[in-house]
Image (tube, rainbow, N blue to C red):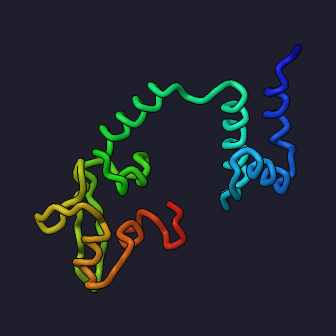
């Protein structure tokens, strides 16, 4: 008997999006997220294989969690920032604001502005402007719609 799983996975590519969303509801017992089609396909493919062949072993999950904590120190905010999005330590961010050039240095675990350490770019943007800003937007690392 042949394994039907590869055929199910291949069919995801040509399945209409409303049908993918219905599969999501069936496989995850929740409403599908508002993400793009590729995301739905990849998560559905993983879930189909997970249900058919089994998920990660508990020791693998524990190891991944330990590695994640080593990277972000268990700080949930840091874990949301993708590592490949973070500027390399030593990078200098420049922004002119009201005629004054502001220089921020990226550190291994945060940022430095005017000789003081900061945990976030938003805190620096607030110190510069006196108002709340998304620091990534303020320094031009992300546009106001969330794209890099």
Say which residue appears at 30% left-offset and 38% top-offset.
70
Q: Position of residue 120 (x, y in %)?
A: 28, 63
* Residue 21 spot, x, y in % from top left: 78, 54
The front one of 99 and 83 is 83
Residue at the image position 40 percent from the left and 29 percent from the top: 63
- In the image, residue 62 sits, relative to residue 92, either above or below, namely above
On screen, residue 15 versus residue 123, left or right, reads right
- How many numbered discs sit on the rendered protein? 0
From this viewpoint, which residue is outermost toward the left? Answer: 115
Front residue (pair 5, 86): 5
Seen as rendered, the residue at the extreme top is 1
Query: Horizontal placement of 82 versus 73: left or right?
Result: right
Residue 84: image x %, image y %?
Answer: 43, 46
The residue under the point 64% across, 26% down is 54
Please determine whether, in this image, residue 60 is positioned above or below residue 27. above
User: Residue at coordinates 16% horizontally, 61% vertically from top-left?
Assistant: 117
Most foreground residue, 126 or 1: 1
39 with respect to 77 (left or right)? right
Q: Is residue 17 left or right of residue 60?
A: right
Task: Work out whether residue 140 or residue 75 is closer to the camera in this orientation and state it.
Answer: 75
Q: Quadrant of the N terminus?
A: top right
| Furthest-front residue in this view | 29
Q: Which quadrant of the figure has residue 43?
A: top right
């Amino acid at each position: 008997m042949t394994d039907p799983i590869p055929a199910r996975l291949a069919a995801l590519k040509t399945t209409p999006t409303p049908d993918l969303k219905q599969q999501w509801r069936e496989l995850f017992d929740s409403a599908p997220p508002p993400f793009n089609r590729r995301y739905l396909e990849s998560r559905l493919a993983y879930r189909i294989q997970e249900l058919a062949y089994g998920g990660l072993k508990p020791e693998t999950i524990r190891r991944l969690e330990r590695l994640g904590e080593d990277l972000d120190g268990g700080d949930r905010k840091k874990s949301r920032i993708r590592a490949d999005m973070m500027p390399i330590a030593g990078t200098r961010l420049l922004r002119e604001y009201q005629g004054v050039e502001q220089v921020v240095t990226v550190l291994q675990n945060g940022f430095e502005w005017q000789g003081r350490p900061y945990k976030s770019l938003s805190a620096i943007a607030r110190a510069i402007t006196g108002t709340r800003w998304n620091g990534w937007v303020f320094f031009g690392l992300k546009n106001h719609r969330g794209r890099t």
